[in-house]
Amino acid sequence: MMAKLRITYRKSAIGYTERQKATIKALGFRKLNQTVEQEDSPAIRGMISKVEHLVDVEEVK
C-alpha cells in the first residue's frame, strides 16, 4: 500500500496563473481551507511542487 498525503488548500490562487489554478482544481480542491487526501505518487508530488506556496502537505500513516 502506498502512503497517502493530506493536502490543505491554505492560500487563494487569485492573482496566480491559470495553470496554477488548474493544478489546484486537479488536486481536488473546490474551497479554501479544504483538505483532501491523495495517494503519494510522482505525479501528485509534481503538482504539489508547482503550488507549494498555496498548500500545506503532511504525510498520513
Image (cartoon, rainbow, N blue to C red):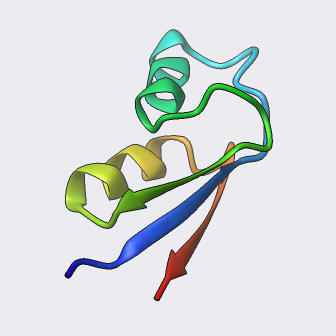
Q: Is residue 60 above or below residue 7?
A: below
Asked whether, in this view, residue 30 is left or right of residue 5, the answer is: right
Q: Is residue 61 above or below residue 35?
A: below
Residue at 63% in and 25% down: 30
Residue at 45% in and 38% down: 27
Asked whether, in this view, residue 58 is left or right of residue 26, the answer is: right
Residue at 33% in and 52% down: 44
Residue 42 x/y as whole percent: 22, 60
Residue 60 x/y as whole percent: 50, 80
Residue 51 position by quadrant: top right
Residue 11 x/y as whole percent: 79, 38
- Quadrant of the frame with the N terminus: bottom left
Residue at 72% in and 43% down: 34
Seen from the viewer's position, the closer of residues 40 and 19 is: 40
Residue 59 x/y as whole percent: 51, 78
Q: Extreme top residue here?
A: 18
- Total marks in image: 0
Q: Is residue 19 above or below residue 28?
A: above
Q: Is residue 58 above or below residue 35?
A: below
Q: Extreme bottom residue here?
A: 61
